[in-house]
Amino acid sequence: MFKKVLVANRGEIALRVICACKELGIKTVAVFSEADRNSLHVSFADEAVCIGPAKSAESYLKVPSVISAAEITNADAIHPGYGFLSENAYFAEVCEACHIKFIGPPPNVIRLMGDKARALAVMSKAGLPVLPGSSGIVPSVEAANEIAGSIGYPVIIKASAGGGGRGMRIVRSREELGTAFATAQHEADLAFGVADVYIERYVERPRHIEFQVMGDNFGKVIHFGERECSIQRRHQKLLEESPSTAISDAIRHEMGAKVESALSSIGYANAGTVEFLMDEARNFYFMEMNTRIQVEHPVTEMVTGVDLVKLQILIAGGSRLHFDDHLKPRGHAIECRINAEDPFTHIPSPGRVASFNVPGGIGVRVDTAAHTECTISPHYDSLIAKLIVHANSRPEAIRKMERSLEMFVIEGIKTTIPLHQRIMRDADFAAGRFDTRFMERYAE
Ligand code: MV4
């Protein structure tokens, strides 16, 4: 096993990885920017290296600085967390070249999944259901016209280098297609430096359901069930839960088996998430794959009882997956993302946290690196805590979340706590009646 792991991240996820290392008896190295000198991930790591100024591009995103920190401290592996360098295939290659284990999938798999059009084609061939579409990049407006005509309107144009909702265009008629195609290509080029786009049938009111997977380096891939992520706003998830109210044991079993076989056929290893759209008839369509541990991984941990971050480290160190074929989810877990922002305008609210009091009790988990008197920096994303509850049933989990939100006291900055309190009291949410447009009702 590794002797020392460098954690190439900050905030709650850096602390989460440090916790996993401590439990495995592995030493840790934190890296930090000048803005994060007094952060908890720095205090709790065995060693810490300053890698640059506050700006991410000059610190957490800077490959030579992170690699140098690993070399200097003699770390034998790097855990990238989520965001920053976690899905950078080049970074994973540099780690490999420097004989530092990258705790994640192989670089070629990261690169494949980063190319959304290619990922779709490969996953379709590997047996996952996909929407009718261009099956690859659309070279011209003439080709776009022909494809859209044969799929039928509405269609959606997506940037192949995109993901997470950036660079998409919905097209409702033939008349709109020419302009939409040109605009989509232009926006893709501006945002990602690659103009490639693809087309698929547009699903009006989808749910976003994703499967957690883990693969070892011996060809075995296991799924850990699904997460329901439809409660989001502007492509930012607000709340996630597992299991989804829209999935039966039979469907989970069927989709899980498809996901496992598709991923083992491409040599997938380590943690990953396969995202699906579900339409109103409850058909699944593969959308994209994330090749990292995700923000919302704790809901899966709570219902499966598996520490996914420890498992990532063990697998990267050469361990085999040795689970019985079917992990059955136990009870119900919900996660609320507590962001430092105005709950109703979505404007960031960085600053000094005057007081910070976390809820506790049975089935209540708080993943955070915040504390009383800490400062939320405007330089990074606004997530300050994840509040996760686990109970025997969904109604009990909702009640537990309500009381935990009430007992979560954060003063000095605005947070999304009041927004989550409204969702917990929503009759449609309680009934499991929602899709990705659920939050539009709170728009005013
Ligand atoms: C779609 C779609 C409807 N039809 N694709 C948004 C994020 C990006 N990964 C893909 N997205 C969507 N793709 C087709 N063919 C609707 C969305 C979408 C969405 C998806 C998941 C979660 C929230 C969403 C919010 C708006 C649109």
Image (cartoon, rainbow, N blue to C red):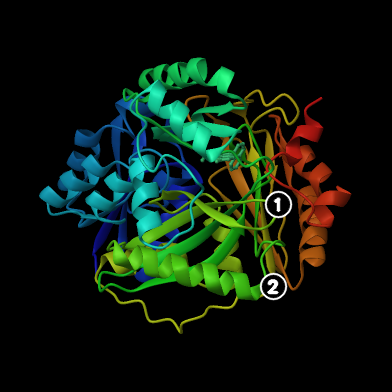
Structural crowding at the residue carrying mark 2, measured as other residues with C-alpha within 10 Å and reported as few (<14), some (14–19) or many (≥20): some
Residue depicted at x 66% and y 29%: 341
What separation in Å lies between label 1 and label 2 (alpha carbons)?
A: 25 Å
Residue depicted at x 38% and y 64%: 262
Residue 169 occupies quadrant: top right
Residue 83 in the image, given as x and y percentages of width and height: 42, 40
Residue 431 in the image, given as x and y percentages of width and height: 83, 57
Ligand 1 located in image quadrant: top right
Structural crowding at the residue carrying mark 1, measured as other residues with C-alpha within 10 Å and reported as few (<14), some (14–19) or many (≥20): few
**Residue highlighted by disc 1:** 280
In this orientation, does residue 22 appear?
no
Q: Nearer the viewer, mark 1 or mark 2?
A: 1
SS type, badge 1: loop
Q: Which residue type does callout 2 highlight? A: Gly
Q: Quadrant of the C terminus?
A: top right
In the image, taking residue 442 as reference, residue 348 lies left or right, namely left
Question: Of residues 9 and 146, which is closer to you in this image?
Answer: 146
The answer to whether 200 is drawn above or below residue 405 in the figure is above
Residue 383 in the image, given as x and y percentages of width and height: 57, 39
SS type, badge 2: loop
Question: Of residues 34 and 280, which is closer to you in this image?
Answer: 280
Residue depicted at x 46% and y 68%: 258
Q: Quadrant of the N terminus?
A: bottom left
Q: Which residue type does callout 1 highlight? A: Glu
